Image (cartoon, rainbow, N blue to C red):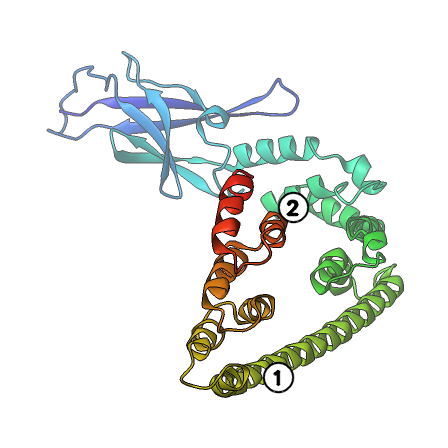
Amino acid sequence: MGGVLLLVPVVDAIRASGSEQEVQQVTKEGEILESNVQCPANPLREARVAVDIDSVEFDAGTTDQKGSVVFDLDAVVGVDAKLDPDGKGKVVVNDKTVGDVSLKALYEKREARAWSGVAVVECKSPTSPASCDGVVKYLRDWPEGKHAPMARQILQEARPAVMRLRDEKAWTDAAPTTCDDKKETIHGVNEACAGVRAYLKDYPEGMHASEAKKLVEKADKRIAKINERLEKEAREEERKQAQAALAAERAAEAAERERNRCPRNCADSTRGYQSRGFAVCQALVCEGEHPACAKGCSQKCGGYDRTQCMAVCHRLECEIGGSACIRGCASRCGGYGNARCVAVCFQTECESE
């Protein structure tokens, strides 16, 4: 007994003329069961067929009732497949390799298609830095292609013009007029001149390198001046802080000396340490929160010994605030010593304000 026969005609490529086709045929012989015995007609139906290129399978469909399948390699093989002009793809049926198929025609067809899409004329007379991008992409994808030598020649001839265009675009993108602005901060200068610095790094011998160097030198001088100013301001601020600290220290020392002298001053301005005036002076001037105001009350009351007057004055002027109304009441009542009069006046005229 023989085995089944699988016939796979593969439509591999249609040449540029559109009239000629290249067809490849793969035949799979079935397993031999017994010699010299005719095999029954038993084709392999509905079998899954794929083309394997570098271990990547592309589905080509399934066999028909006669055990055949016809497919176009260009339609089956993905556009990202890496092709070799001398390479072959494996024909796989139901996960078993049964033969191979040449990839040369497919390679040539796709290479020709890729070249036909390249803007060759634009690259020959470039008007922008991207004018030759298509040629560059072609060479990257088809380094061994039929048109690769021509592509390399075109790129070589266009290179000076493309480099000039790239240089000019890079300079425009660098925004040199912005770098020439007088910024007030180091960050501002660096930000404004970042593009010019980048241009000079990428094009040290570029068409605008001389101008770029002058702008960078000018920017560096500007930064140096800003640093000098900032350092001067910092020194001045340190000097002011030191003066303020010294003044505060001296004020604290003076206040401490005044506190130390206060009891004796109270004794001198009253009838001595045993007097009622001394106790009032010490409580209001030496230990109170409003010593200056308390001294003013002493003058208005005629001394610290006038305890009732001092109490009313201190309460109304030092603690409450001593408004014009309060001082008016004191004046109308003949002074804070007339406590009852001042209290009635305050409650009647001042508390309602």
Which residue is rendered at x = 43% and y = 81% of the image?
A: 275
What secondary structure is marked by label 2?
helix
| Residue 74 place in picture, x, y as percent | 50, 27
Q: Mark 1 points at which residue?
A: 246
Work out which residue is located at the far top of the displayed protein and give it.
Answer: 65
Q: Is residue 18 above or below residue 112?
A: above
Judging depth in this view, the residue of 224 and 340 nearest the camera is 340
Q: Which residue lies furthest to the left in this view?
A: 34
Tell me if residue 126 comes above or below residue 45 in the rendering.
below
Q: Picture coordinates of residue 79 (x, y %)? A: 51, 33
> Would you name the residue on which mark 2 appears?
139
Q: What residue type is labelled 1?
A: Leu
Q: What element carries label 1?
A: helix
* Residue 194 located left or right of residue 113: right
Residue 62, horizontal then vertical, whole percent: 31, 19
Q: Residue at x 49, y 69 (%)?
A: 306
Amino acid type indicated by mark 2: Leu
Q: Position of residue 170 (x, y in %)?
A: 78, 52
- Precedes in sequence: disc 2 or disc 1: 2
Residue at 56%, 39% in the rendered image = 353
Residue neighbourhood size for the residue with mark 2, other residues' Cα within 10 Å, grouped as few (<14), some (14–19), many (≥20)? some
For residue 208, what is the image quadrant?
bottom right
